[in-house]
């Protein structure tokens, strides 16, 4: 499976995602520059974490207007796989490829720590190799990860099974404390109705090697490999 | 008698003495105009010229086989083998952080990052060493919040992890916070760049953000005490743009990777002036600059303002004429200005034109090399008053003492701080913040990099020479605890007004202590920073040497971490307990005293202890290691329990004639608390004995409580969970109004 | 031509920053402050457009770029001709 990692001005987790795909997963991987119009035939587009455009205006608000994003939107419309990590998730929300929006973390501070998330939907291309309800240890690092949606949107998201991950405690229970940033319904990751576009705030590329303390991020990345036809 | 061009008021505002002015006139061959006076003011300031410290810094060892670049460039460089080098340095941003904590700290991060990538290294780690006044004062809380937010905001945005650091609280820092920022980068040995212009005819290119009026005379401000007009100094603090700097990092590293530039320097303290004089000076050349071509974001800027502005995120590049188009294209890709503003000349002078006229014409060497070095009068610190050495009564409740120590901000858990820093970006962080040293893996190598910042101002206040030695010893000890051997040193020396003989004496002796310790460990100091004038009114800070020491771990899989790993492991104490209370947190917090002298530092014993530990680690015998520092053995053991995944406690026993509070809370040096499987303990003791290091089995891990017995009496029996709660909540509670201790 | 666009969270959206500001004001003794909502002010300088074009442009900029309409509302005004 060929991976493409998008680079915006200010992206800073792009080399981490690249390393995870090319060196850890051993898959052909390329960088996609934000001003380009060519997706270079990749099978999966990754929008990495970082501070695209400094998070100025709103996280992801300016990046979503990049020329390359027009191609990504078309690629997603045709069923192409798109994974948005952290800032990448924020870009997908700004593009309305995923529902809702991000607010500032409930504690009003940037938060970097290991968290546990629960797999809510194991039938997506991003979670196929997970067990239902599996608890994954993956770190977060963000200021604006507090997911919000107006009531009708929230109901639709839940009814359609679009919630892929929720913040939970290490035993898998949903508690207020485990919802570290205050997201509605402890939403940590979503998928679109078509099931091909996924966004999550935790960083799977930071939990992909034993030396880093957890390999649970590989569950997401390896699921993608199972989608090769 | 001819009247001077500039009267005393003007000289005072420029922080130049009449003698210095006389020397400037001699060197330039005439009186300087106001713009030229401004140049000298900035470049001859304490911060830029080191005029009060140079003489004493000469005693520091700066050469070693692994040193690629010592002091004198933007950062130091150490060879780590496999074709790689590490580039690192520490810088202070103390005065701006008092005036505007958020931006002062943020631009401190920006500045040190530039010092690293200007050498060709990608920055991969940041650490910060902070000192604040006590947190019951709202002003100190506000400064701390601003500083932590500033570091967080800049470091996170630019995507370099802040992996470690230290924080201390003491009254002396109330009006003089200390913010020292360390940065380390990785580079290939044959891809290093220096601040040089090389040949005449080369082009000088200005890259990065536009120049505005911020921070003019920031360097001079750093060289003065604060007075009553501090509020008015606000416009002197620069505002940072980490997004811009991220673009600058990528563009600069790209042109360096492609080797299409000849030299590069960042515009930091003293802005364009510094780069435009230091670069040609290093190559024995001069520079001709057209100030009208400098990109400006404000209208009507004067040459004075353009040359002295400290607007952030700007670099000066020297390139051959044939390289210029490629350089411009690279910067354009990242949407950055890259403008030719001048050329390298053969005349050894800095010549600047503005609106067609020559406004600056001075010899480069006068500005850069010929600032006088002062041998300021110094005196030995006064002996402590007799009451300082009076013994204190032992406590009645040792568990309560431990509770109070764990809850004190200097000792308490710092997650409230480092949770605000992205410490995992770049996916190299192997040992997260909270241990004594940070550890990074190196992609493509079995080796690991360890690094730590250490320094105790109270020890140095009591005895500067010992304080200097102790800072080095502590840092090396922290590195040994993760299995790393120290390979290089950078230092940030934070002191009061050097024109006071007492302060100069503190400086001289601290540096002598540092030198002796570095020599004993075979370490070179590759560069660093001196921050003087950390005084407000009558209050000077404690002499605070902050050491940044980098270590190498040969095999990252052999990493040792501080947490207890399992039940029933043997706990071994390397080194000796002594009856030393001076300078300890225990003496200060419980008895309200500083004492008369800090704990003694025996460098030979220190080295033997570290070698013992490293040999035991190399033999695979060690399960965990930590060194007792602030709060002593009891706090050290508690922290090992907090770092263990299950919250495993321990039961330790000491048979001794020493006072129990000295054993549990004293801060004697050269001690390490390690654990091993019981069957390996004997071999560790044998290694210690071979090296002449006292060592004994102090107890075992296990249970869920911290139990300490001295001479048969169980003095502490504290549940780990309770201790951990106190330690974890102490800092955040200060920032939650309902929970704040009164 | 100078214009101003204001952006703030919709009433239904929780504004923790506004709340933090309100609490801080209370701590300082300003009990009269009942509620605070935090927003952004964009001061825009337009050139080479008629007033009519500006009246079309400004709400478009506001809705498409400056505000995230899922959670934010905006208003605009022309300050002087």
Image (cartoon, rainbow, N blue to C red):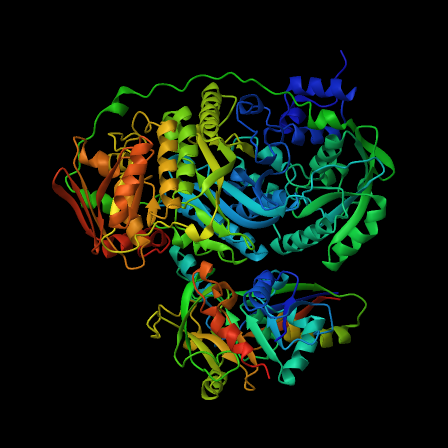
B723 sits to left or right of A47: left
- Report the front residue among B610 and B224: B610
Above or below, B509 against B709 in this view is above
Give residue B585's position: percent from left, percent from top: 30, 37
- Report the front residue among B310 and B54: B54
- Report the front residue among B80 and B385: B80
Q: Residue visible at 41% across and 47% down?
A: B141
Q: Residue visible at 38% across and 25% down?
A: B463
Residue A210 visible at all: yes
Task: Give the residue at the far top of this rendering.
Answer: B1
Q: Residue visible at 75% across and 28% down?
A: B364
Above or below, A218 against B317 in this view is below
Quadrant where the N terminus of chain B is found in the figure: top right
Task: Give the residue at the far right of this rendering.
Answer: B356
Above or below, B171 against B555 in this view is above
Give residue A213's position: percent from left, percent from top: 43, 61
Give residue B640's position: percent from left, percent from top: 31, 49
B460 sits to left or right of A75: left
Residue B405 visible at all: no
- Report the front residue among B203 and B35: B203
Asked where in the image residue B223 lies, by quadrant, the reply is top right
């Amino acid at each position: 499976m060929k991976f493409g990692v998008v680079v915006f001005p200010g992206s800073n987790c792009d080399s981490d995602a690249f390393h995870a795909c090319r060196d850890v997963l051993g898959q052909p991987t390329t960088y996609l520059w934000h001003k380009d119009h060519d997706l270079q035939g990749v099978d999966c587009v990754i929008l990495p974490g970082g501070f695209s455009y400094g998070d100025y205006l709103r996280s992801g608000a300016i990046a979503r207007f990049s020329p390359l994003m027009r191609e990504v939107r078309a690629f997603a419309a045709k069923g192409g796989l798109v994974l948005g990590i952290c800032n990448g998730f924020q870009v997908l929300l700004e593009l309305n490829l995923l529902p809702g929006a991000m607010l500032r973390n409930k504690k009003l501070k940037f938060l970097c720590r290991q968290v546990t998330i629960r797999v809510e939907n194991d039938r997506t291309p991003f979670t196929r190799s997970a067990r239902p309800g599996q608890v994954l240890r993956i770190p977060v690092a963000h200021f604006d990860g507090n997911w919000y949606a107006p009531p009708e949107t929230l109901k639709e998201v839940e009814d359609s099974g679009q919630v892929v991950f929720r913040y939970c405690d290490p035993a898998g229970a949903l508690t207020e404390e485990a919802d570290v940033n205050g997201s509605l319904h402890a939403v940590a990751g979503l998928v679109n109705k078509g099931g091909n576009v996924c966004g999550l705030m935790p960083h799977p590329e930071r939990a992909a090697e034993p030396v880093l303390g957890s390999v649970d991020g590989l569950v997401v990345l390896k699921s993608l490999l199972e989608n090769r036809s | 008698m001819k009247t001077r061009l500039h009267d005393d008021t003007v000289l005072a505002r420029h922080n130049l003495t009449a003698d210095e002015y006389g020397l400037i006139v001699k060197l330039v061959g005439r009186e300087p105009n106001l713009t030229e006076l401004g140049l000298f003011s900035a470049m001859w300031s304490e911060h830029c010229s080191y005029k009060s410290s140079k003489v004493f810094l000469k005693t520091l060892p700066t050469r070693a086989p692994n040193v690629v670049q010592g002091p004198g460039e933007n950062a130091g460089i150490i060879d780590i083998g496999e074709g790689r080098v590490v580039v690192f340095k520490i810088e202070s941003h103390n005065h701006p952080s008092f005036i505007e904590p958020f931006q002062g700290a943020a631009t401190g991060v920006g500045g040190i990052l530039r010092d690293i990538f200007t050498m060709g290294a990608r920055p991969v780690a940041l650490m910060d060493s902070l000192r604040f006044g006590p947190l019951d004062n709202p002003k100190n809380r506000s400064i701390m919040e601003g500083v932590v937010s500033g570091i967080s905001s800049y470091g996170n945005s630019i995507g370099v992890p802040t992996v470690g650091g230290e924080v201390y609280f003491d009254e002396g820092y109330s009006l003089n916070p200390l913010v020292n920022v360390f940065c380390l980068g990785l580079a290939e040995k044959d891809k290093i760049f220096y601040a040089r212009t090389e040949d005449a005819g080369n082009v000088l290119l200005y890259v990065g953000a536009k120049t505005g009026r911020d921070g003019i005379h920031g360097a001079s401000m750093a060289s003065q005490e604060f007075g009553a007009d501090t509020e008015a100094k606000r416009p002197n603090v620069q505002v940072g743009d980490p997004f811009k700097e991220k673009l600058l990092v990528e563009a600069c590293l790209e042109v360096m990777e492609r080797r299409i530039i000849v030299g590069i320097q960042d515009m930091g303290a003293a802005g364009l002036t510094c780069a435009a004089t230091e670069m040609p000076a290093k190559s024995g050349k001069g520079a001709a600059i057209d100030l009208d071509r400098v990109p400006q974001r404000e209208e009507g800027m004067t040459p004075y303002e353009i040359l002295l502005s400290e607007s952030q995120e700007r670099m000066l590049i020297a390139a051959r004429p044939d390289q210029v188009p490629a350089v411009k294209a690279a910067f354009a890709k990242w949407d950055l200005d890259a403008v030719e503003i001048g050329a390298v000349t053969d005349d050894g002078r800095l010549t600047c034109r503005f609106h067609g006229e020559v406004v600056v014409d001075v010899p480069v060497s006068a500005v850069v090399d010929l600032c006088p070095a002062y041998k300021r009068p110094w005196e030995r610190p006064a002996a402590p008053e007799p009451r300082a050495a009076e013994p204190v009564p032992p406590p009645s409740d040792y568990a309560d003492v431990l509770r109070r120590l764990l809850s004190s901000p200097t000792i308490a858990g710092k997650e409230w701080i480092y949770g605000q820093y992205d410490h995992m970006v770049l996916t190299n962080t192997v040992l997260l913040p909270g241990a004594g040293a940070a550890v990074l893996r190196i992609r493509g190598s079995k080796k690991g990099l360890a690094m730590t910042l250490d320094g105790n101002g109270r020890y140095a206040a009591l005895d500067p020479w010992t304080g200097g030695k102790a800072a080095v010893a502590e840092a090396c000890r922290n590195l040994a605890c993760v299995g790393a051997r120290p390979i290089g040193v950078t230092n940030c020396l934070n002191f009061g007004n050097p024109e006071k003989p007492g302060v100069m004496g503190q400086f001289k002796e601290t540096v002598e202590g540092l030198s002796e310790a570095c020599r004993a460990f075979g370490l070179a100091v590759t560069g660093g920073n001196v921050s003087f004038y950390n005084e407000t009114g009558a209050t000077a800070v404690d002499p605070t040497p902050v050491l940044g020491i980098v270590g190498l771990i040969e095999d990252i899989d052999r990493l040792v971490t501080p947490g207890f790993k399992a039940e029933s492991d043997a706990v071994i104490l390397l080194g000796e307990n002594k009856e030393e209370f001076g300078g300890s947190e225990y003496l200060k917090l419980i008895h309200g005293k500083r004492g008369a002298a800090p704990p003694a530092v025996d460098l030979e014993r220190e080295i033997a202890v570290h070698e013992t530990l490293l040999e035991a680690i190399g033999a695979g015998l060690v399960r965990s290691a930590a060194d007792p520092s602030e709060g002593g053995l009891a706090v050290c053991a508690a922290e090992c329990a907090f770092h263990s995944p299950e919250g495993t406690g321990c039961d330790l026993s000491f048979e001794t004639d020493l006072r129990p509070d000295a054993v549990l809370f004293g801060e004697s040096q050269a001690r390490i608390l390690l654990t091993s499987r019981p069957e390996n303990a004997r071999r560790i003791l044998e290694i210690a004995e071979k090296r002449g290091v006292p060592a004994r089995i102090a107890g075992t891990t296990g249970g869920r409580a911290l139990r300490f017995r001295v001479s048969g009496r169980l003095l502490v029996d504290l549940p780990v969970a309770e201790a951990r709660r106190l330690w974890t909540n102490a800092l955040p509670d200060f920032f939650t109004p309902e929970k704040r201790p009164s | 031509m100078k214009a101003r666009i204001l952006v703030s969270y919709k009433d239904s959206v929780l504004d923790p920053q506004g709340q933090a500001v309100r609490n801080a004001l209370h701590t300082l003794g300003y009990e009269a402050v009942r509620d605070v909502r935090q927003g952004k002010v964009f001061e825009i300088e337009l050139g080479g457009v008629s007033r009519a074009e500006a009246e079309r442009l400004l709400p478009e900029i506001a809705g498409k770029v400056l505000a995230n309409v899922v959670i934010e509302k905006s208003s605009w005004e022309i300050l002087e001709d």
